[in-house]
Amino acid sequence: MHHFHYVGPNLHCESVDLAEIARLYGTPTYVYSAETMADNYRRLAEGLSGLDLQICYAMKANSNIALLRHFSNLGAGFDLVGGGEIKRVLAAGANVKSSVFAGIGKTEAEIQLALENGIFSFHVESEPELARINHVAGKLGVKAPIAIRVNPDVDAHTHAKITTGKSDNKFGIPLKHAAAAYEAASKYPNLTIKGVQMHIGSQLTSVAPFIEAVRKITPFVGELKALYGITYFSIGGGMGIVYKDALASGAKVWWDAQPADQRPLTPETYAAALVPLLQPLGLKIVLEHGRFMVGNSGVLLAKVEHLKRGAGKNFLIVDAAMNDLVRPAMYESYHEIVPLHRDSGRRALVADVVGPICESGDCFAKDRQLQEVGEGEYIAFMSAGAYGYTMASRYNTRAMAAEVLVKGGTFELINARETFEQQIAGEKIPAFLK
């Protein structure tokens, strides 16, 4: 469910007409719904209320500090990857004491920053990392809390570039080697074994892989509790969202019309399947969802530049590009594309929706049927709240997009569009070229 809907002919986010935002701040612009994020968080927390639960928002999905403050206010910790994300949490006025630090290449400086700010736990990806964390903790005179990421070798049945729980992925330690890794960890004087972690992939649309992974790992979790007194089990994140029919999916009538075996994975279905498996462990359960929290909470607004009619092919050229939203170019991902002003009297248009970048890959959709839209009109790319702005770039010296947060009938700019001067502020011409 989400809070994007038409009011009459005009697309709204909550109670705000999106065309008003486009006119005020220009395009491309990301717009986020605060209420959708809150709903997603609450549904997940309520569904798993029978557990000792900590939700750590996977901020790589969208790391704007306004969104981090919003999730912190709701009670979330954070799933962090790198020192920059730690600094973003601190800049948001939140803390890292309920947060976990993931990633396969933590530097000594990043480990020190996490320890100095009271990180809840490190999620360790390799035995060399254990030695590095122990070394830094020793220099600081503290004990570092750790959990080892165990790779269960479970197929998440998702895109190859976002699966993480198979034996040939770069993440974690295979289950068959995990006992030895924990034994090695127990011998380091500056480490405290606190838990165990797993994560099998992103954009999972069925609960079955989660069930398989939890069942595969839980016997080992019980052994760790008996041997080392671990206090938590992180089952990662990865719950998928609706991309096709994303606009309609915000309405209950759409949901009721879906066959029971084809309905999207929901927090209620997820919780009903996993709580009975997790509750007997008697441990704190940590979740690290990102896309589920923010994916359907955001859209990318763009303006039509013109329609190029070719021999057997139409191209709808818009002012957004692959630098703004790279998922279609990178993953062949689908985003629903809708007009901000809907007019049932207009004829349908079939076109490739493309941006102005000098790459053939700068294409959002091929042979997509849309309402015909003209130069200067606005469209929205749905389900763009996750892995949109955070994966954006300045390719072709294009400015980073603006970001706006909506709550009810109010909205505010939370990230101004980048200026050219900001883009080149760190660049210089060396003296030997002058």
Image (cartoon, grey):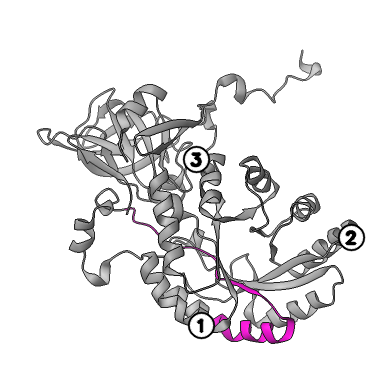
Q: Which residue is mark 3?
A: 389
Is 242 a magenta residue?
yes
Q: Tell me the magenta residue range.
A: 216-243
Q: Earlier in the sequence, mark 3 or mark 1?
A: 1
Query: In the depicted view, which residue is nearer to us: 262 or 85?
Result: 85
The label number, if any, that marks residue 215 in the structure image:
1
Amino acid type assigned to the residue bearing label 2 in the image: Gly
Q: Report the front residue among 277 and 309.
A: 277
Q: Is residue 106 visible?
A: yes
Asked if 404 appears above or below 430 in the picture, the reply is below
Q: Is residue 356 above or below residue 212?
A: above
Mark 2 and 1 residues: CB-CB less than 8 Å, in contact?
A: no
Give the residue drawn at x 36%, y 66%.
Answer: 265
Name which residue lies at 77% across and 50% down.
113
The quadrant of the rendering that contains the N terminus is bottom left
* In the foreground, 431 or 65: 65
The three-letter amino acid code for the residue at tag 1 is Arg
Find residue 173 and report its image quarter: bottom right
Question: Where is mark 2, residue-wise?
Answer: 141
Rounded to the nearest whole Å, what is the CA distance between mark 3 and mark 2? 39 Å
